Image (tube, rainbow, N blue to C red):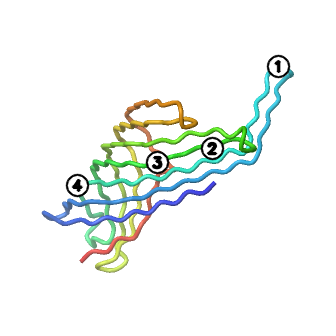
Amino acid sequence: STTMQYETFIGYFVANDLAVGARFSYNRSMFNLGSVSLDINEDLNFAVENFYSIQHMYTGSVFLRNYVALGKSKRFGIFNEVRLSVGGGQSKQITGENNEDITGSFQDILQMELGLIPGVIGFLTDNVAVEASVNVLGFEYKKSSQVRDQIYEGSFESSGVNFKVDLFSINIGISFYF
């Protein structure tokens, strides 16, 4: 299983400690499983042969970020970011052992999110800072259109509100200020 994520952003200060900007991200995940078998009893068993999954997503966002300095030195601070994101991507899953038993699905994905992202920032120099943030609150909408075995078509939509701190979504990065 491998996951790669690349993200870049640019912002402009419209007032003291208030920035607006845009960000772009690319996320790719891949999972490959050879063979798994689970036998609970003679009537209940489960097996997966040669499962492969890959997904990639492109996301564009606009944000509004407010900074608050901690102390008089202005070397450390906290920020709060409100972000509106729209993204799209594709996914495919394949399972099977040989050409006769192969089955798979292909998805087109559309995703939108409105989120609240707090974080901390520490300036190493006047122009270079290290920052960490975590997704705390967000509303997400996702629509997927799927084709299975190049015959069956379907789609589904999901939406939800997230009110929890996701420790697996901690973002750490370096920012350059000009």
Instruction: Give the x, y percent position of residue 48.
Output: 73, 38
Furthest-top residue in view? 43
> What label does residue 90 carry, if any?
3
Indicate which disc, 1 or 3, sits on the residue closer to the N terminus. Answer: 1
- Other-residue count near label 4 (Cα within 10 Å), few / some / many at <14 / 14–19 / ≥20: some
> What label does residue 94 carry, if any?
2
Disc 1 versus disc 2: distance between alpha carbons?
26 Å
Q: Could you tell me which secondary element the residue under label 3 belongs to?
A: strand
Pick the quarter of the image with the N terminus. bottom right
Q: Could you tell me which secondary element the residue under label 2 belongs to?
A: strand
Front residue of 125 and 93 = 93
> Which amino acid type is marked by label 3?
Gln
Foreground label between 4 and 2: 2
Disc 3 versus disc 2: distance between alpha carbons?
14 Å
Pick the quarter of the image with the C terminus. bottom left
Question: Mark 1 — residue?
Answer: 43
Foreground label between 1 and 3: 3
Disc 4 versus disc 2: distance between alpha carbons?
40 Å
Instruction: Give the x, y percent position of residue 147.
Output: 50, 36
Indicate which disc, 1 or 2, sits on the residue closer to the N terminus. Answer: 1
Foreground label between 1 and 2: 2
> Which amino acid type is marked by label 2?
Ile
Compared with residue 77, is residue 1 higher up or lower down, i.e. above or below?
above
Indicate which disc, 1 or 4, sits on the residue closer to the N terminus. Answer: 1
Judged left or right of residue 121, residue 43 is right
